[in-house]
Image (cartoon, rainbow, N blue to C red):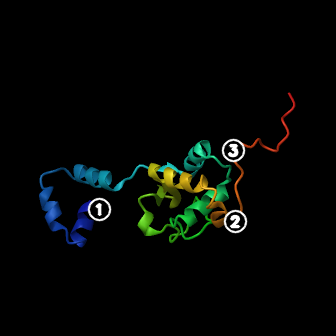
Amino acid sequence: MQVVLRAITADEIGRIAEDEGKPIFRIVGEVKEKTEKKSIRFSTVETTVREKAKFRFISPQLKMVLKYLGWTTEENFAVDSPSDNLIVPEFSNMIWIESVDSIKASRKVVFSEHAITPILEVVDDPALHPIVFGKSLVSTQIPSRKPPKPS
């Protein structure tokens, strides 16, 4: 019913007429299919980039990459319950805020699978490290400085 009311208020009467004869649940389903995007969580992006990257990074540095790419307005943001103006609208095909619980009104920053490649390109470009991170990242080829765990 909300779909019909929104269409009426948006002056889309012609669209309703095109769907005439269809049950309302089919119209609602078609609208949802057109608006829902496949999304992946921040932690999935982080894990995927980390597995493919030539350099080590931490979560706050991944957020710095998002700010460098111009996708976000801040480099230090909360993934859960983010601010409304965090995402730059031009990049809403790569990153967006999704409602995860309509009753509690909780929201999360989520990504398109296509976001992984541009993020990885920035992380793997050592010439960008001083600009993006303020320092060079450590290569994944260099062994960790942590002493081995005793057996």
Task: State which mark lies toward you, 2 or 1.
Answer: 2
Question: Residue 73: x percent and y percent?
Answer: 55, 71
Q: In which quadrant of the rendered view does residue 74 lie?
A: bottom right
Residue 134: give its label.
2
Q: In which quadrant of the rendered view does residue 14 lie?
A: bottom left
Tell me the amino acid under the disc marked 1: Gln
Q: Are marks 3 and 2 in contact (CB under 8 Å)?
A: no
Return the residue nearer the eye: 43 or 103: 43
**On the image, numbered disc 3 is attached to which residue?**
140
Tell me the amino acid under the disc marked 2: Gly
Local crowd at mark 3 within 10 Å, few (<14), some, or many (≥20)?
some
Question: Residue 145: x percent and y percent?
Answer: 82, 44
Q: Secondary structure at mark 1?
A: helix
Q: Are marks 1 and 3 in contact (CB under 8 Å)?
A: no
Tag 3 or tag 1, which sits nearer the N-term?
Answer: 1
Q: Are marks 2 and 1 in contact (CB under 8 Å)?
A: no
Q: Looking at the image, which residue is at 23% across and 66% down?
A: 7
Q: Looking at the image, which residue is at 74% across and 43% down?
A: 142
Q: Quadrant of the C terminus?
A: top right
Question: Residue 113: x percent and y percent?
Answer: 46, 49
Q: Secondary structure at mark 3?
A: loop
**On the image, numbered disc 1 is attached to which residue?**
2
Q: Looking at the image, which residue is at 55% across and 69% down?
A: 83
Residue 85 visible to the viewer = yes
User: How far apart, in angstroms, are the residues tagged by discs 2 and 1?
Assistant: 49 Å
Tell me the amino acid under the disc marked 3: Thr
Residue 37: give its label.
none
User: How far apart, in angstroms, are the residues tagged by discs 1 and 3?
Assistant: 52 Å
In the picture shown, does residue 97 fall above or below 113?
below
